[in-house]
Amino acid sequence: MTNYLISGARLADGTTTDLHLHEGRIVDEPVPGAERIDADGLLALPGLVDLHTHLREPGREDAETVRTGTLAAARGGFTAVFAMANTDPVTDDAEKAEYIQLLGRRDGSAQVVPIGAVTKNLDGKELAEMGLMARSEAAVRVFSDDGRCVMDSLLMRRALEWVRPFDGVIAQHSQDAGLAGPGACCHESEISGRLGLGGWPAVAESVIIARDVQLAELTRSRLHVCHISTAEGVEVVRWAKQRGINVTAEVTPHHLLLGTREVEGYDTTFKVNPPLRTDEHIEAVREALADGTIDVVGTDHAPHAAQDKDHAFADARPGMLGLEQALAVVMETMVETGRMDWPTLVERMSTAPARIGRIADQQGQPLVPGSVANLVLVDPSARGTVDREASASMSRNNPYHGRELPDPVVATFWQGRRTFQR
Ligand SMILES: NC(=O)N[C@@H](CC(=O)O)C(=O)O
Ligand SMILES: [Zn+2]
Ligand SMILES: [Zn+2]
């Protein structure tokens, strides 16, 4: 295994240091024969951790595989991704969770942590074997029916109760299907009327969050709110945290940057759940990410094959790519606007997601001797125009295509191994 000397890197706190990578760890002494990397002018940050990735394997290997999805992750500066359960078959038992972990070990350019389904086959009817998934070698701690909302309140209560003994967390896709018509595919607002598209009202999100935080309080269990996108949802989470309820929340890069205006041309790349919102909501999620009401950025990287996007807007699959531009978008919306400093970015994109997903013994560690060598070298001043054809992902539903953005990731190291270099 190659050892590295990363010389003269600036850390998030502003100090400059040499980093010695030896056999997958950061050590305090120079290692003879190490390959020297000049990091003058570069920032070294802990490897990013994504709590919300769709890898599509097994079942839709034409859209993404563990190999291509984790290549995209490495390119984006990530050293770990949590793989959502809505594959085919669904990750809803111990054997399937171990299989995802195995695929990650075999093909991964980043750590792949399986998320287990809350209900069997995501049907929302019967709880999946969450305890067996937790006890399996995959040691699953995050459970989600993402793609679908756990609508049944009693089932949601039982799920929260069930995961508490083994410190699990229920990650909810908060969207009340009953509050939107069958064809809902964009934010309910002036624009849905004008474009003639069915709308999701903001309250479809916040009513579920309000229910779930109260269930989390009742059960004293952990709730994670996936891809929060509304001012109302943020207000409920703020209230719940003030009450001491054990809730964490996540925002996607696209909900930080993109809005309903993208939908004007009916480009199905911009069809996503929850939908892109209006400026007041974008402002609310930015503010909440800055003040800690929102704990993490999760990409909701959702690759789709062209044949699933080449449809009328109402019929196309929802979802967009996120891994490769996540850091760029957070820099553009949060750091360069002066809302967030680098230590807070590290907390939101590495430390907190590792802690929530209970992999802090492997990921999200500070860049000090003794830590696992997971890190990303960042050029904070580089910019470029996003080209979806240059993506490591197998899919092309990149919502930033043609946009000028920061282009920060210079190199990524996972367990001391270089997984990406520009
Ligand atoms: N975000 C999306 O619009 N789609 C996701 C599912 C989800 O995150 O809800 C997908 O799996 O494609
Ligand atoms: Zn979702
Ligand atoms: Zn998702």
Image: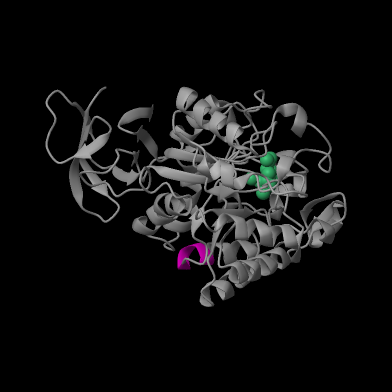
Is 403 placed left or right of 28 in the picture?
right
Q: Can residue 336 be spotted in the picture? A: no
- Is 181 rendered above or below residue 97? below
Is 247 within the magenta? no
Please name the residue shown 78% across and 49% down the image.
Answer: 125
Residue 199 locus on image (x, y percent): 81, 56
Q: Over which residues does the magenta segment extend? A: 287-291
Q: Residue at x 56, y 68 (%)?
A: 220
Quarter of the figure that contains the N terminus? top left
Residue 231 percent location from the top left of the image: 64, 68
Q: Main secondary structure of the magenta part?
A: helix
Residue in the foreground of this view, choosing between 194 and 146: 146
Q: Quadrant of residue 163?
A: bottom right
The quarter of the picture where residue 92 lies is top right
The residue at the point 19 percent across, 48 percent down is 16
Q: Residue 290 lies in magenta, yes or no? A: yes
Q: Position of residue 2 (x, y in %)?
A: 25, 23
Q: Where, quadrant-wise, is the C terminus in this rendering? A: top left
Q: How many marks?
A: 0
Observer able to see residue 285? yes
Instruction: Name the side, left or right, on which 326 lies relative to 273.
Output: left
Question: As rendered, which of 232 and 93 lies closer to the eye?
Answer: 93
The reply, left or right, for residue 402 in relation to residue 110 is right
Residue 412 vs 327, above or below: the answer is above
Ligand 3 lies in quarter: top right
x, y percentage for residue 135? 51, 42
- Please give the name of the residue rendered at 64% of the width and 37% of the height, measured from the top-left corner: 91
